[in-house]
Amino acid sequence: MKIAPSLLSCDFSKMGEEIRRMDKAGADWMHLDVMDGHFVPNITFGAPVIKWVRSYTDKPFDVHLMISDPLRYIDDFADAGADIITFHVECDADIDATIDKIKSRGIQAGLVIKPNTPAEAVFPYLDKLSLVLVMTVEPGFGGQSFMADMLPKVSAIRRECERRGISLLIEADGGIGEGTIQQAADAGVDVCVAGTAVFKAPDAAKAIAALQAVH
Ligand code: DX5
Ligand code: ZN
């Protein structure tokens, strides 16, 4: 299992050092949660912050946009050094145009679905995507409980991809830790985001290794 620590749970006063700490601890990707206070009821950081911390690791930056109008900001996140950009199918922007814009910048595009959104919402776009992110909590905050009832959506997306001969990664985000990751793996998740479980662990390297060992 690939593990992407969510920087939402880090000490923002030393975000660069926290990224370096996660890199040394063996993280596969860095997961950066961008929130606009409109699409979700929380505000975090934007492209300028990502640009400043980009140099602290060579690991891929997985930028999760929880914003109403992602299309308007794709160039900013591309310039800041994003490797993967995921945005919500529930947003206000034109979905196809946003995917095309991300790909035109040489970045991998992914779509995210909230807990109340069915798996079928991403089916029309699967052949254009590198990744689908299934939220296993309501987006907005770290430290929430894992919603195991989201996992059938992972299986449904996997089945649909297999049926159409599409290969993409499925990522899960929210409430993932040692007690829940096996269920995600069993459902066919390839990449797990983990905030609290990694940042609040006494030994981040140990925590990441334990999560990666699941398959
Ligand atoms: C929630 C974010 C998640 C969150 C995960 O809106 O998308 O990435 O930080 O945090 P934990 O692992 O603590 O649920
Ligand atoms: Zn996230």
Image (cartoon, helix red, strand yellow):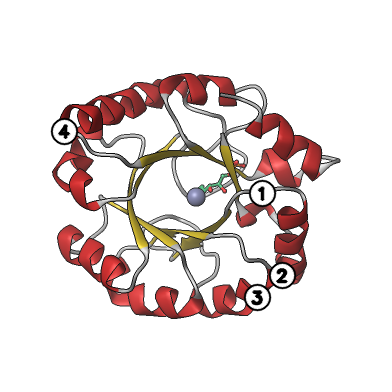
Q: What is the three-letter code of the residue carrying label 2?
A: Gly
Left or right of 45? Residue 91 is left
Foreground residue among 191 and 172 = 191
Task: Tell me the CA gap for discs 3 and 1.
Answer: 16 Å
Mark toward the start of the polypeptide (4 vs 3): 3
Q: Which residue is mark 1?
A: 27
Pointer 1 or 2: first along the chain: 2
Dot placed on the residue nearer the N-terminal end, 2 or 3: 2
Q: Which badge, 2 or 4, comes first in the chain's sequence?
A: 2
- Viewed as shown, does residue 61 lie left or right of 133? right
Q: Secondary structure at mark 3?
A: helix
Q: Residue at x 42, y 21 (%)?
A: 187
- Give how far apart the Cα atoms at labels 1 and 4 are: 32 Å
Crowding at dot 1, Cα within 10 Å, few <14 / some 14-19 / many 20+, comes out as many
Q: Is residue 55 above or below residue 123?
A: below
Query: Residue 28's spot in the image, x, y percent?
Result: 61, 49
Task: Using the image, tell me which numbered label, if any, was put on residue 55.
Answer: 3
Quarter of the rendered structure image containing ligand 1: top right
- State left or right for residue 48 relative to residue 115: right
- Quarter-wise, where is residue 1 in the image? top right
- Numbered mark located on residue 81 in the image: none
Residue type (three-letter) at the residue carrying disc 4: Arg
Verify CB contact (< 8 Å) between mark 3 and mark 1.
Answer: no
Q: Which residue is mark 4?
A: 164
